[in-house]
Image: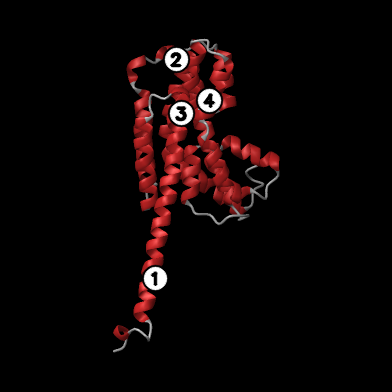
Amino acid sequence: MFDRLSDTNRRAFIDGVKTLSPAVPATFSWGLVTGIAMAKSVLTVPQALGMSLAAYAGSSQLAVLPLFAAKLPLWTILLTAAMVNLRFVIFSAGLAPHFAYLPLRRRLVLGYFNGDIIYLMFSKRNFPVGYQPGKEAFFWGMAATSWSSWQVSSIVGILLASLFPDNWGLELAGTLALIPLIVSAIATRSTLAAVGVASVIALITLDLPYRLSLPLAVISALLAGTFADLIAEKRGARAKSKAASAASPENPRSVR
């Protein structure tokens, strides 16, 4: 199948693989932690493997494990998973203009393979909306790299959970590996505002039920980033207006 790709798509796919490669250690760590947690929970090995392949969302998988152990109602478990994964609705909305020309079935497959780091790195490329040669192949290069590293590490964690002590701190290692990727994405004031506000909201709402802190942090980040962009646009418009006024022939200061 790879040989059937055009030269443009082949280069774009490889570019996607290379782009996501720095995130593989963080993805591998999180997948390993999630696999170990599932294996040491009330889930059987087949159930854990099924969750890893079907859900492909570490945060929600970790969030619902204590709920399974507490034997809470199914609606509570589903609501918690939905709250944690609410951010993917925003990610999908961001990708929609880029792949709206694709059939629904193909877009659904893209949605399954989308993720936090994939969306972050895809957005950094500033692709124009609509069809562009190589854009989808670039996405698939990142998606294949992320999915394979996640599933391999998660399955290793599930099958070899007994070999990993609980005090190894792999979850912290995954978090630390993600920090440089997040910092590198802070390229504008609006992004900095979004990150700062989201961090504060996440800390303040940490103890809310159903992991509501995560969607609240995401929504707050969007509002903060949008507000910062509006302020920047207004300042830019004022600066242009002042510059145009200063350069106007009717302005005595512009006459030499």
The structure residue drawn at horizontal position 47% and vertical position 41%, both measured from the top left corner, is 20
Q: Amino acid at mark 4?
A: Ala
Select label 1 or label 4 by which is in front.
Answer: 1
The structure residue drawn at horizontal position 41% and vertical position 66%, both measured from the top left corner, is 237
Badge 3 vs badge 2, beta-carbon distance below 8 Å: no
Q: In the orientation shown, which residue stands out farthest toward the bottom?
A: 256
Asked which quadrant contains residue 247, the reply is bottom left
* Neighbourhood count class around disc 3 (C-alpha, 10 Å): few under 14, some 14–19, many 20 upward: some
Disc nearer the start of the sequence (2/4): 4
In front of the other: 233 or 65: 233
Select label 3 or label 2 by which is in front.
Answer: 3
Q: Could you give the CA–CA distance between mark 3 and mark 2, rounded to whole angstroms?
A: 29 Å
Side (left or right) of 235 relative to 45: left
Disc nearer the start of the sequence (1/2): 2
Asked which quadrant contains residue 26, the reply is top left
Q: Could you give the CA–CA distance between mark 1 and mark 4, rounded to whole angstroms?
A: 47 Å
The residue singled out by tag 3 in the image is 212
The residue singled out by tag 1 in the image is 240
**Residue 161's disc number:** 2
Q: Amino acid at mark 2?
A: Ala
Q: Could you give the CA–CA distance between mark 2 and mark 4, rounded to whole angstroms?
A: 23 Å
Where is residue 242 shown, x and y percent of the image? 35, 73
Locate the C terminus by quadrant.
bottom left
The structure residue drawn at horizontal position 60% and vertical position 50%, both measured from the top left corner, is 97
Side (left or right) of 10 relative to 239: right
Where is residue 93 shown, x and y percent of the image? 57, 44
Q: Could you give the CA–CA distance between mark 3 and mark 1, rounded to whole angstroms?
A: 42 Å
Q: Amino acid at mark 3?
A: Leu
Disc nearer the start of the sequence (3/4): 4
